[in-house]
Amino acid sequence: MKKTLTRILTLTLAVLLALSLFACAKTDDKGDATNDVSTTNAPDNTAAPEPEAEPDSDLEIKVYALNGTTALGMAQLMSRQKSGTTGMNYNISTHAAADAITGAIISGECAIAALPTNVAVKLYHKSSGKLQLLALNTLGVLYLLTPDGENITSLDQLSGKTIYLPGAGSNPEYITSALLSSAGVKEYHLDTTSFPSPDALVAAVAAGQAQYAVLPEPKVSAATAQNSSIKVALDLTAEWEKLNGEGTLVQGCLVVNTAFAKAHPTEIARFLSDYEQSVNFIREGSDEAISMIVDAKIIPAAPIAKKALPKCNICFIAGADMKPLMNTFCEKIFAADNSSIGKMPDDGFYYVG
């Protein structure tokens, strides 16, 4: 009986001690025990970050580009497409004329296209917004060529001259017109019909049939390779930037079909990343980059590609950075000739992702 009472007393004391300790922990709001419990067991209300969506690697993304400068930044990406190392289903092709591209980008036959900037603005208006500016990919690439005996060092020396350009309604015509107007040159004649394509004008310059001619790279290098007495008299990019600011002569761009961009933003983001990588690689001008340019048939020969590339001003400018540069460019060519773009683009023109 005595042992039983002892056991009951011991058990009772143990229970009372446990209750006492529990009560102290609960009532001590600032005590270590309470803080330990709340820190350990409090629910974590921080939302977990949403995982980034993976692009659909099976989705075909057709990209059309013009042969020449606006396609240069695409060369590494074209090489990766050929070797199957992009991880995406890109289908990139080059074309000889803008007419083969403009209808395709509006209809959605292709998702992305490389075009002259003034053509992009015109198409935006004409299609009621069925395309948007995706990135700027080419700054100024125009040069005034003269025979070796001529000594043209400023725009005002072109007063009264006939200047040959490769085709009517193109960026070279509008840029040259804007520059001459800004320089105060009143009398001049821009001949866009005698030699209506870049290759025709290259041949005319090389043969001495066009004394003053404006050509883009890489056609400048092609002309001087054929006739070493031809010289570059003026860099029109330098002349433009004296008047309008650095980086505002934007001649080439990428546009995207608006409906495609809305439906596939993740894939567009991936393309832009891959394209920027390609531009940066090609700009370095390594032997491998030159080989990629020639393999893609953008420039036919390695010596011309190597000579021309540093003067082609390829770039990658996307998002909000596009707008101030493009606006300045459009304002200047529109003021010189309102048929250049029809009217100024609105905010809907810019794809900012």
Image (tube, rainbow, N blue to C red):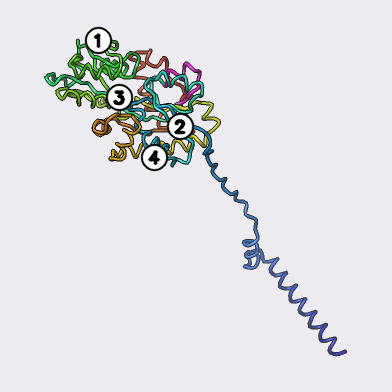
CB under 8 Å between discs 1 and 2? no
Residue beneath label 2, please? 91
| Mark 4 or mark 1: whose residue is earlier in sequence | 1
Residue furthest to the bottom? 2
Residue beneath label 4, please? 277
For residue 39, above or below residue 342: below
In space, the residues marked 1 and 2 are separated at their CA atoms by 42 Å
| Mark 3 or mark 1: whose residue is earlier in sequence | 1
Q: Can residue 240 be seen in this snapshot?
A: no
Residue furthest to the left? 149
CB under 8 Å between discs 4 and 2? no
- Residue 179 on image: x %, y %: 27, 18
Q: Secondary structure at mark 2?
A: strand
Mark nearer the viewer, 4 or 2: 2
Q: Residue at x 40, y 32 (%)?
A: 321
Q: Residue at x 44, y 36 (%)?
A: 272
Mark nearer the viewer, 3 or 1: 1
Magenta-colored span: 120-132
Q: Can residue 87 be seen in this snapshot?
A: yes
| Mark 2 or mark 3: whose residue is earlier in sequence | 2
Residue beneath label 3, please? 244
Which amino acid, by three-letter code, is at mark 2? Asn
Q: Residue at x 53, y 34 (%)?
A: 59
Residue beneath label 1, please? 189
| Mark 3 or mark 4: whose residue is earlier in sequence | 3
